[in-house]
Amino acid sequence: MQHTMKGHTDSVNGVAFFHDSYQVVTGSWDRTLRIWDAQKGTLVGKSFEGHKGSICSVVISPDDTRIASGGEDTTVIIWDVESRQKVFDPLVKHQDNVWSLCFSPDGKKLASGSEDEMVVIWDTETGAVFATLLGHRDRVLSVAFSPDGLKLATGSSDTTIIVWQVDNAKRLFQINARPYSVGSVVWSPDGQQLVSASGDKTIKFWDGSNGNQIQTGPCTDGHTGWIDSLAISSDGTFVATASEDKTVRLWSTKTHQQIEHALKHTDEVYCVAISPNGTLLASGGRHREVYLWSIGDALKRYDVPVEQKEELELEQLEQLRLIDVSPQQDMLPTYTSEVITFSQCSRKRT
């Protein structure tokens, strides 16, 4: 049974798990970041405030000590988790909305993609610009470092994915995903594949070494609206997609078939993240709520021979908890120190 409980005061555009899977951070058009206890559904400490416009993207550093956020105010802010203070003054280089962010695996670099068609790689130890990547001809909606940190994949409304070599900022190859925008792109955990979500309501699989298409996912038989966000599990066995058709769906990376029924929201869904332990899924969107779903049992039931499966009812995929805290509520902060998974945001179309 689903319960609707409100937290943010505007659309939720970004969500990410800490690596222990017990805490979640969210970013919203209400200009705040918030950390939540995923087990209790409560706010942890005070919100992060500092952006002068809506927050479009959020990501956690690999050591869980920092959070980065990108905003409508064109800036990137790196925050200290414990103090909730800015590590540097807002990072300024972009000229428009910062739609996507990704830390490198070692945490020493941060990539940002913007409405201004530019990708910037930042040095997280100094806040300086490490490299500026020019090549896209429309907004950059997604950025993703490869697991080894040597490559960066960027997806754009210009219908392309570009894979860059990080150390010299050179373009390695370009993938043409025509005719629709590439709203989200992620690497498989082994770095062998790229997975992308497009405006044609599909997910596609690409060879991470040369960009050749491997498989078109079956999302044309599932989603009926634009896919805004894509996340992949830490073991690479399944992906989750969030759509403006008001649903989140799970897909097997092996069979490319949908797992279970759609997880239904009351409005457009802009962001999704999978917990590192693979048992929880967080999603948020226009309805201002953050939903935490328990998916572990459903995944176990799916992982049997197809001929042995029985139709599973939606009630069996029970929503674990919804987050409900007023912005004024005071809670004592608690902190953990593990690592991450991430998701990019939200309302990216004009």
Image: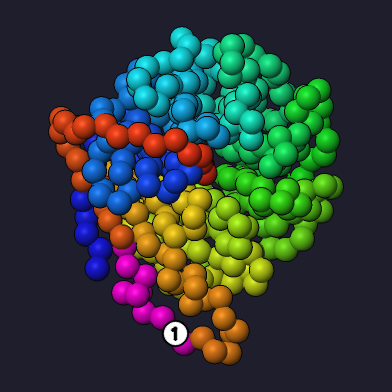
Q: Residue furthest bottom?
A: 307
Q: Does 49 sit left or right of 326 as displayed? A: right
Vertical order, 125 against 196 (above or below): above
Mark 1 is on which residue type?
Glu
Q: Answer few, some or many: residues within 10 Å of disc 1's Cα (few below 14, many 20 plus, some between 14 and 19).
A: few
Q: Which residues are magenta?
A: 310-319
Q: Is most of the magenta stretch helix, strand or loop?
A: loop
Query: Is residue 9 in sight in this rendering?
Result: yes
Judging depth in this view, the residue of 178 and 320 nearest the camera is 320
97 is higher (above) or lower (below) than 242: above
- The image shows residue 340 at horizontal and vertical percentages of 51, 41
Q: In the image, residue 150 lies at what x, y percent?
A: 76, 34
Instruction: Please indicate, yes or no, whether residue 28 appears anywhere in the rendered image.
Output: no
Residue 315 located within the stretch drawn in magenta: yes
Q: Is residue 68 left or right of residue 192?
A: left
Q: Which residue is mark 1?
A: 311
Local SS, label 1: loop
What residue appears at the point 59 percent right and 72 percent down from the top-left corner? 257
